[in-house]
Image: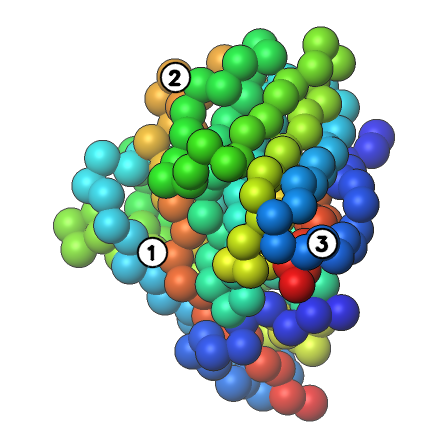
Amino acid sequence: GESVGLHLPTLSVQEGDNSIINCAYSNSASDYFIWYKQESGKGPQFIIDIRSNMDKRQGQRVTVLLNKTVKHLSLQIAATQPGDSAVYFCAETAASGGYNKLIFGAGTRLAVHP
Amino acid sequence: DAGVTQSPTHLIKTRGQQVTLRCSPKSGHDTVSWYQQALGQGPQFIFQYYEEEERQRGNFPDRFSGHQFPNYSSELNVNALLLGDSALYLCASSTTGGKEETQYFGPGTRLLVL
């Protein structure tokens, strides 16, 4: 399949380590944030989301942290596995009323080495 | 329960031609959004359809148009194709006013304009 994110910043980690991917968002009015994972040749896959009334949310092996003061979002992946290798995008939206166009960040490539 | 599906998977056109891409939303979803993803970049919002009407549009020219059918499926049409229209076109579905405003993406249609 085609490569996604040929010139994106890359985070290289060893299998089993924890990964932290950071994202700065742009709109102070955004109230809903989503992390997507995109593998080569595929569409973005939902990982985890968080609303602006929260500052932390945990899923299975993933945690999202939201700092509204500095408009910063992070995705933490515990015990990173080779299958986690992909490009990760954060997305923001003002979700009220359903007019919820997503604004995507630039993306980060995660490379997991055995 | 089928997820979001798109057709065709790949398409090659020449400059000046017209193209139609198709999307079927996830079961239970009534809202369809279209995004363009250039190589190495995050998806860019084109427009969103709900109740068979375009209700939100990104910064794309009128050459980009769409349609939503009573069964919630959608088409994206691009006229007078330019080389710069070469990209991965993604469809995402969600619900409006319902429990699932999160947008779930299909696999995309890779368009190459020669």
Amino acid type, callout 1: Leu
Name the mark on residue A97.
2
Residue with the mark numbered 3:
B13
A5 or A48: nearer the eye? A5
Task: Identify the residue shown where x is 68% and y is 25%.
Answer: B74
Q: Is B61 on the left-hand or right-hand side of A77?
A: left
Sequence-wise, the earlier of marks 1 and 2 is 1
The crowd level at tag 1 (other Cα within 10 Å; few <14, some 14-19, many 20+) is: many
Image coordinates of residue B106 in percent, x first then y, are: 70, 43
Viewer-nearest of discs 3 and 2: 3
Q: Quadrant of residue A97?
A: top left
Residue with the mark numbered 1:
A73
Image coordinates of residue A76 in percent, x first then y, are: 46, 64
Amino acid type, callout 2: Gly
Q: CA distance from mark 1 to mark 3?
A: 39 Å
Q: Is residue A8 above or below residue A77?
A: below
Badge 1 marks a residue whose secondary structure is strand
Q: Is residue B46 above or below residue B11?
A: above
Task: Identify the residue shown where x is 80% and y is 45%.
Answer: B8
Q: Chain of mark 3?
A: B
Task: Identify the residue shown where x is 51% and y is 36%.
Answer: B63
Find the residue positioned furthest to the front: B16
